[in-house]
Image (cartoon, helix red, strand yellow):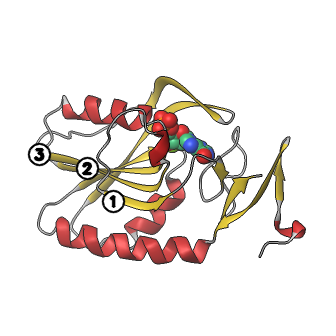
Amino acid sequence: MTSLSDTITIKDLEFIPYVTHSDILERIKEIGIKINQDYENKNPLFIAVLNGSFMFASDLMKQVDLKSELTFIKVNSYEGTESTGSIKEMIGIGQSVTDRHIVIIEDIVDTGHTINHLLSEISKKDPASIEVVTLFSKTESHKTDIYLKYIGFDIPNKFIVGYGLDYDGYGRNYQDVYQLV
Ligand code: IMP
Ligand code: MG
């Protein structure tokens, strides 16, 4: 049950509670266990996609019990509540991915344009393997078939904010996730 007082307003839009921080942390623990099994002795390089994945990356990495590295990439394809389809790379990976086991950390895969762009760019540099961990997937909105090895929550095509996810730059700071009314 959600009451009116739980709703938040960001700019012109109203959002209601959707996934709590504690549910997110519980799911991240489960994903962490799988990653620890799958990447044992593989020295993975995690690449977190900024800005949206900063909270997820932070909580996920606390569950990773492996010799591993973490770096960041910054891309941008969203304006307001719509994916624009054209990807701008704002900060590149300052590190070699060749022969490395790569795990891309995303906050959410919507149309899949962003992740497909990253997968094809990173694949050109001959990594040993490349997989995706995403906290949310709007699987019914994917424009192509995308294999996402680890998905936190499969959600319907509705705009969400919080836990790193923003609406026009705002709302990233909430620890819970909210859904557009
Ligand atoms: P895609 O390229 O359409 O898959 O969009 C991926 C990116 O758009 C994500 O990394 C997010 O930054 C952003 N995005 C997609 N859906 C949402 C949402 O519901 N809320 C906030 N940001 C979103
Ligand atoms: Mg993002």
Q: Vertically, is 131 above or below 24?
A: above
Is the C-beta separation of discs 1 and 2 under 8 Å? yes
Query: Which image quadrant: the N terminus?
Result: bottom right
Q: Which mark is residue 40?
A: none
Q: Could you tell me which residue is drawn at 89 percent across and 68 percent down?
A: 5
Mark 2 and mark 3: span between their CA atoms?
10 Å
Residue 153 placement (x, y as % from top left): 48, 62
In the rendered structure, the answer to whether residue 169 lies left or right of residue 6 reads left
Q: Residues within 10 Å of mark 3 (few under 14, many from 20)?
A: some
- From the image, tell me which residue sits under label 3: 128
Mark 3 and mark 1: span between their CA atoms?
18 Å
Q: Which mark is residue 131?
A: 2
In the rendered structure, the answer to whether residue 20 lies left or right of residue 116 reads right
Q: Vertically, is 165 above or below 74?
A: below
Mark 1 and mark 2: span between their CA atoms?
8 Å
Q: Which mark is residue 150?
A: 1
Q: Vertically, is 76 above or below 139?
A: above
Q: Amino acid at mark 2?
A: Glu
Residue 7 placement (x, y as % from top left): 83, 62
Occupied quadrant, residue 142: top left
Residue 44 placement (x, y as % from top left): 21, 57
Asked which secondary structure carries label 2, the reply is strand
